[in-house]
Amino acid sequence: MTTSSRNVFGASLTGAPVTTALVAINVLVFMLLTVTGGSDNAANLYRWGAKYGPAIADGEWWRLVLPIFMHIGFFHLLTNSIGLLIFGSMAEQLLGGRVYLSIYLVTGVLGNVASYVISPTLGAGASGAVFGVIGAFGVYLLLNRRVMGEVARQAITSISFIIVLNLVIGFATSGIDNAAHLGGIVAGMAMAYLVAPRQRFVLTPGGYGISPAQLGVHIQKRPGYMLVLAVVVAMVITVAATAIRSSDYPYPNDFESCGYHFADFSDPVGNFPFGCRSLRD
């Protein structure tokens, strides 16, 4: 493994402008939520475009995108920002800014699609995208483990532990959107398999038959159409899953146990429970 490849295993915003921009956007949106009614206020989250099943079923598909940049409470923002700073900065340097940003957005959307299919409850957060980045980072290491050596294998073990631990905590704790986490992880792993660069050992002949041959590492980037293909497939899955689920989406019945019907809280200026609770993605 070369010195440059070792350097990416340290979280740093140097050389990671996309990660810096994403964190800044998340912080800005959180500040806007805070000053316009609160980041943990259901009505305010709804106004800003949080994921909400019945509204998506009615055609408000932008609620699959905007929640990626919204957070419910400061601790939610803090944990996702830390995860993005640690794993995002490394993934961006390994994958490249364009591929990394595509993975972040696509996995965030597909995480919300999975959440929409499973639960109609109000939700917001970048966790689906962060888990997608982590999953993509893990697959990159897996694909290139022979070249990157023991450090990559140790990192894969650590990433696997982090993912499993977070999922266990999520299933054991109420108010956490595990569907979004799982959707993000699966989407990130699939995208990385298609678009992540491959590292290969190459033997360079010595000069003029005098100097010895040298063993180096060649980084082979994937063709650009693979990224386009991955994004198109993600869009098809988004449209198909959302349309199919919308055809029989639970409007009143799903909320009868809470004592409310969809019509009781479809007005964004009202004080409504959104299925009794909000989910942190």
Image: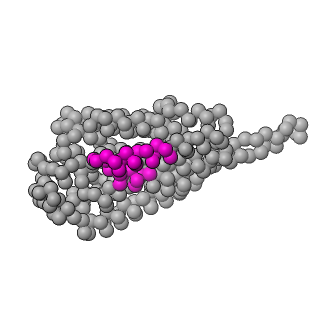
Report the front residue among 176 and 216. Answer: 176
Give the residue drawn at x 85%, y 38%: 212
**Left or right: 3 in relation to 10:** right
Counting from the top left corner in percent of width and height, residue 37 is at 17, 37
Report the front residue among 73 and 215. Answer: 73
Give the residue drawn at x 13%, y 54%: 265
Residue extending farthest front: 172
**Left or right: 266 in relation to 25:** left
Give the residue drawn at x 14%, y 61%: 256
Vertical position of residue 117 compared to residue 99: above or below:
below
Asked where in the image residue 234 lies, by quadrant, the reply is: bottom left
Coloured how?
one colour
- Decide whether residue 179 is among the magenta residues: yes
Report the front residue among 170 and 104. Answer: 170
Counting from the top left corner in percent of width and height, residue 76 is at 31, 38
* Quadrant for the N terminus in the image: top right
Residue 25: tell me if it is visible. no
**Left or right: 76 in relation to 265:** right
Q: Which residues are magenta?
A: 160-185
Report the front residue among 220 and 178. Answer: 178
Give the residue drawn at x 40%, y 48%: 167
Asked where in the image residue 84 lies, by quadrant, the reply is: top left
Counting from the top left corner in percent of width and height, residue 96 is at 53, 43
Please tell me whether the stretch drawn in magenta is mainly helix, strand or loop. helix
- Decide whether residue 23 is among the magenta residues: no
Residue 10: tell me if it is visible. yes
Asked where in the image residue 41 lies, by quadrant, the reply is: top left
